[in-house]
Image (cartoon, helix red, strand yellow):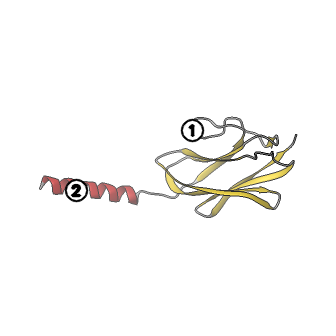
Amino acid sequence: MIRTARLAALALAAGLTAACSQPLTVETIQLGRSLNADQSIASQTTTFKPNETVYVSALNNARGDGVVKVRWMMGTQMLSEREKTVKFAGSGATEFNISSATGFPEGDYSVEVFVDGVSVGSRKFDVRK
């Protein structure tokens, strides 16, 4: 009887947790050279040298879950597309980065952030020597 009650309580708690899931909402997109421990951007900038790693961080202010995807572009040419499935109990940050072993060509670039397939914003940046 006690075991049945415990199992019922666990099932109820699991059901309530699943019912409380909500879509992830990205509030801020940061771009920069380095990360903080929480995966937010430590050194924000929009100008990079060819050999630097470029970081983007999508910040959410509340709990939620979903698939965060980024699309890195040089002009109209897609360089890379990556995604992560995330679940946050509160505010958080989802980080992505791109680098080039031979260095990026000088030019204009952008990164677009998607949540569950819907664009939530983009940031432009440039690479200069």
Secondary structure beneath dot 1 equals: loop
Toward the left, the furthest residue is 1
In this picture, residue 48 sits left or right of residue 38: right
Q: Position of residue 96 (x, y in %)?
A: 64, 48
Q: Position of residue 127 (x, y in %)?
A: 83, 45
Tell me which amino acid carries mark 2: Leu
Q: Quadrant of the N terminus?
A: bottom left
Residue toward you, 99 or 67: 99
Toward the front, the furthest residue is 102
Count of numbered circles on the image: 2
Kindly identify which residue carries mark 2. 7
Name which of mark 2 and mark 1 comes first in the sequence.
2
Quadrant of residue 33 within the rendered picture: top right
Q: Residue at x 34, y 59 (%)?
A: 15
Residue toward you, 88 or 55: 55
Graded by Cα atoms within 10 Å as few (under 14), some (14 to 19) or many (20 or more), the crowding at tag 2 reads few
Q: Quadrant of the C terminus?
A: top right
Q: Position of residue 4 (x, y in %)?
A: 17, 57
Graded by Cα atoms within 10 Å as few (under 14), some (14 to 19) or many (20 or more), the crowding at tag 1 reads few
Kindly identify which residue carries mark 1. 38
Q: Residue at x 60, y 40 (%)?
A: 39
Secondary structure beneath dot 2 equals: helix
- On residue 127, which mark appears? none
